[in-house]
Image (cartoon, grey):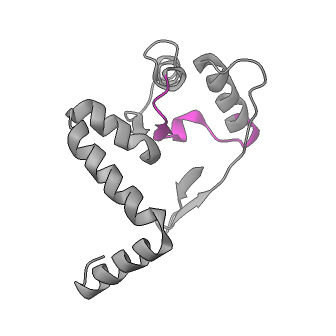
Amino acid sequence: MIQGVNNEFNVTEDFLTLSSLHSTTTGKDVYESLLKELAEFSLPLEKMPGICTDGAPAMTGKNTGLIGLLLGSYCWNVPLVVYHCVIHQKNLAEQTLRMEHVMGLVVCIVNFIRSRALNHQQFKTMLEEIECE
């Protein structure tokens, strides 16, 4: 996914491309593929203010991961902002906060609500009744 802002400050988001890594998926492989795809679309690397990863060592490694290679290969005008994927933030929060007992309960409740359409519908109705988003 790529996001951009035009002169009128309208934000656009679109799927740029999809690349297959045929042999290995090391940080260097991902880095080279990223550079190739950016060059193909004439997008300069310095225009990339942030990147979102899943937390895998090939992506986040300090020296040989994608982030490490990006930070080591280019002098950024502004600091590169590194995001952790929303899908994996539950695991990151558990590891960082050491609150497995709380996160486990939250995940259990969410799974119960989403497991059946009736549960989900009742939950949505309750939120509407108490005027909560």
Give the residues in magenta: 39-56
x and y percentages locating residue 102 in the rendered image: 21, 45
- On whether residue 45 falls in the magenta region, the answer is yes
- On whether residue 55 falls in the magenta region, the answer is yes
Farthest residue to the top: give it. 63
Q: Quadrant of residue 95?
A: top left
Could you tell me which residue is drawn at 49 percent across and 73 percent down? 117
x and y percentages locating residue 124 in the rendered image: 37, 78
Locate the C terminus by quadrant.
bottom left
Residue 53 vertical placement versus 131 (above, below): above
On screen, residue 82 versus residue 103, left or right, reads: right
On screen, residue 81 versus residue 26, left or right, reads: left
Could you tell me which residue is drawn at 42 percent across and 72 percent down? 120
Q: Quadrant of residue 25?
A: top right
Residue 12 vertical placement versus 31 (above, below): below
Q: Quadrant of residue 41?
A: top right
Tally the numbered discs. Answer: 0
Could you tell me which residue is drawn at 43 percent across and 47 percent down? 86
Q: Looking at this view, is 104 or 46 the one in front?
A: 104
On screen, residue 18 versus residue 110, left or right, reads: right
Could you tell me which residue is drawn at 29 percent across and 39 percent down? 93
Q: Looking at this view, is 111 or 128 the one in front?
A: 111
On screen, residue 14 versus residue 127, left or right, reads: right
